[in-house]
Amino acid sequence: MASDAFTNTNFTTLPTHDVNWVVNQGTYYIFSNAAYGNDAGSNIAGYTGQSPSVDQSSEIVVGAITGFVYTGVGVHIATDGSANCYFLRCDDGTDGLVGGSTVSGTSNNDKASSSESLAVSDTLRLEVTVSGSTATLTAFINDVEITSGGFSTAWTDTDHTSGDYGVTHFSNSSASRATSWEGLDLGGGGGGTILPLMMSYT
């Protein structure tokens, strides 16, 4: 697991805040102890301090949100620094939730739902699992799977099959930003059911 509370002085760049962050596209800053992208288009930052399996998740807690300024998460962010990843971003509901793939810096919206929105303190999570060369992606808001709009059908893709987890943002405004982030490795290792400890007294 990896996490970041983005606690730092205003306008500290994300890589200065923590060298494990690598910005693949755009620029990333901290403002009011929350992270946001500062380029007008797509902003992508991957966390390189871990080496997650191909099955992974990325989640933010929303620190601020407004219309047409999309804060979000990324998975399978390219480890070579190129602008490639899967993303999930949302605004306050003015436009809604979008998910898609960025390839060589060009973002393609594969899924959208105008009925979804984010508010301060909400969580936004994207999970990805891989079978063969196909990635299956699942979107969550506040731990509830999103099935509205375009998300009502399965979201599968073959653009990216590995990489880091991290954050994404669309816009150059800090009006939407992430107050904390967490990346999880879903690849297993161990697992199973934890049974309660049975005590016996004689």
Image (cartoon, rainbow, N blue to C red):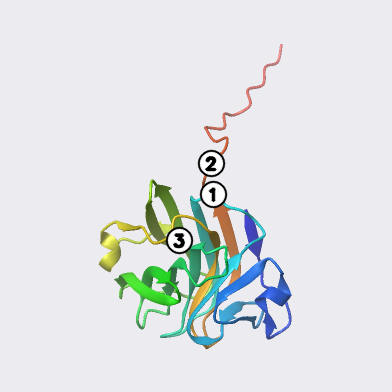
Residue 154 at least partly seen: yes
Which structural element holds mark 1?
Answer: loop
On the image, numbered disc 2 is attached to which residue? 188
Label tally:
3
Residue occupying image coordinates x 50% and y 68%: 73
Upstream in sequence: badge 1 or badge 3 = 1
Frontmost of labels 1 and 2 is 1
On the image, numbered disc 3 is attached to which residue? 126
* Kind of residue at badge 2: Gly
In this view, 5 is above or below 65: above
On the image, numbered disc 1 is attached to which residue? 53
Task: Tell me the CA gap for discs 3 and 2.
Answer: 17 Å
Q: Which mark is residue 20?
A: none
| Rendering coords of residue 127 (x, y %) | 45, 56
* Kind of residue at badge 3: Leu
Which quadrant would residue 200 be assigned to in this image? top right
Upstream in sequence: badge 1 or badge 2 = 1
Residue occupying image coordinates x 54% and y 49%: 53
Which structural element holds mark 2?
Answer: loop
Q: Are marks 1 and 2 in contact (CB under 8 Å)?
A: yes
Q: Are marks 1 and 3 in contact (CB under 8 Å)?
A: no
| Rendering coords of residue 196 (x, y %) | 59, 29
